């Protein structure tokens, strides 16, 4: 996998959870999520138990809870969708806080929030206690197709590169007096996103050609 590359989601530590084999943690997360998804939506006591299990794992890992909670912002799009479900779904109606909403949509929205939040917390706990290279090695050990592992490996390697390029483009715009303040500026941001995509694609092409020139045949050389 090459040299080590840290990640902003990882929290350095030496707990039992940190030292556990990555492939076992991946299997545990998968089993946990299967149980959460299979749990009936109205078994709220079971969901409380699942949350307690995550809290215990986080406590053992010594990762600060705020470190994980701040990163749950990734769930916001799902929360917005869950909030819309009671208003767009069909079926029997019920009243909540003076609003008439779909009962089925309300139940589905609550289930989505609960199960989605548990999944995000569990995934963030795995990411906080496992280096990206360890996760990739664990996936290899679980016999995931080699090329998929390689794609994820390059994604991890070049995530910071693409982020840095995006930051430089932002500085360039601001140095020319541009500040996105209203929807009229969205076309400029869209063109910037398109330029970033093209630059990233071209960089990927150059990297691939460089690999081929060094004898790459679809498999990474042994360590």
Image (spheres, grey):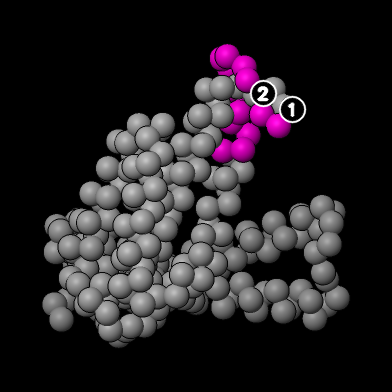
Image position of 25 with respect to 87: above or below = below
| Relative height, residue 204 to residue 115 (above, below) | below
Question: In the rendered image, which residue does mark 1 sit on?
Answer: 98
Looking at this rendering, what residue extends furthest in the top direction?
A: 92
Graded by Cα atoms within 10 Å as few (under 14), some (14 to 19) or many (20 or more), the crowding at tag 2 reads few
- Specify whether residue 1 is in view: no
Nearer the observer, 104 or 188: 104
- Magenta span: 82-97
| Residue 8 in the image, given as x and y percentages of width and height | 46, 76
- Classify mark 1: helix, strand or loop: loop
Quadrant of the drawing holding the N terminus: bottom left
Q: Is residue 51 left or right of residue 218?
A: right
Nearest the viewer among 111 and 89 is 111
Tell me how many marks there are: 2
User: Of the numbered discs in the image, which one, if any, rests on residue 95?
Assistant: 2
Q: Nearer the viewer, residue 152 or 49?
A: 49
**Residue 134 is drawn in which quadrant?**
bottom left
Residue 44 tag number? none
Bin the neighbour count of mark 1 within 10 Å (Cα to Cα): few under 14, some 14-19, many 20 and up: few
Q: Quadrant of the C terminus?
A: bottom left
Residue in the picture at 30% in, 36% down? 38
Residue 110 percent coordinates (x, y): 51, 37
Please give left or right for residue 126 compared with residue 27 in the image: right
Q: Quadrant of residue 185?
A: bottom right
Q: In the rendering, at what x and y percent does residue 116 appear?
A: 45, 46
Rendering coords of residue 154 (x, y %): 36, 69
In the image, residue 178 above or below residue 12 = above
Q: Residue at x 76, y 74 (%)?
A: 173
Q: Give yes or no for contact between labels 1 and 2 (Cβ–Cβ under 8 Å).
A: yes
């Amino acid at each position: 996998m090459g040299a080590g590359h840290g990640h902003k989601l990882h929290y350095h530590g030496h707990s039992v959870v940190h030292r556990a084999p990555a492939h076992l943690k991946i299997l545990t997360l998968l089993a946990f999520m299967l149980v959460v998804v299979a749990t009936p939506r109205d078994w709220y006591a079971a969901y409380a138990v699942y949350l307690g299990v995550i809290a215990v794992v986080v406590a053992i890992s010594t990762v600060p809870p705020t470190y994980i909670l701040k990163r749950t912002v990734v769930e916001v799009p799902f929360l917005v969708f869950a909030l819309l479900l009671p208003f767009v779904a069909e079926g029997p109606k019920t009243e909540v806080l003076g609003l008439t909403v779909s009962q089925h949509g309300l139940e589905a929205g609550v289930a989505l929030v609960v199960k989605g939040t548990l999944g995000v917390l569990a995934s963030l706990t795995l990411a906080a206690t496992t280096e990206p290279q360890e996760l990739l090695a664990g996936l290899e050990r679980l016999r995931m197709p080699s090329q998929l592992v390689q794609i994820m490996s390059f994604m991890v390697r070049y995530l910071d590169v693409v982020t840095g390029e995006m930051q430089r483009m932002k500085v360039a715009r601001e140095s020319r007096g541009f500040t996105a303040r209203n929807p009229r500026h969205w076309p400029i941001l869209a063109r910037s996103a398109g330029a970033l995509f093209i630059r990233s694609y071209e960089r990927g092409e150059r990297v691939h050609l460089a690999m081929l020139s060094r004898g790459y045949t679809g498999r990474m050389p042994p360590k």
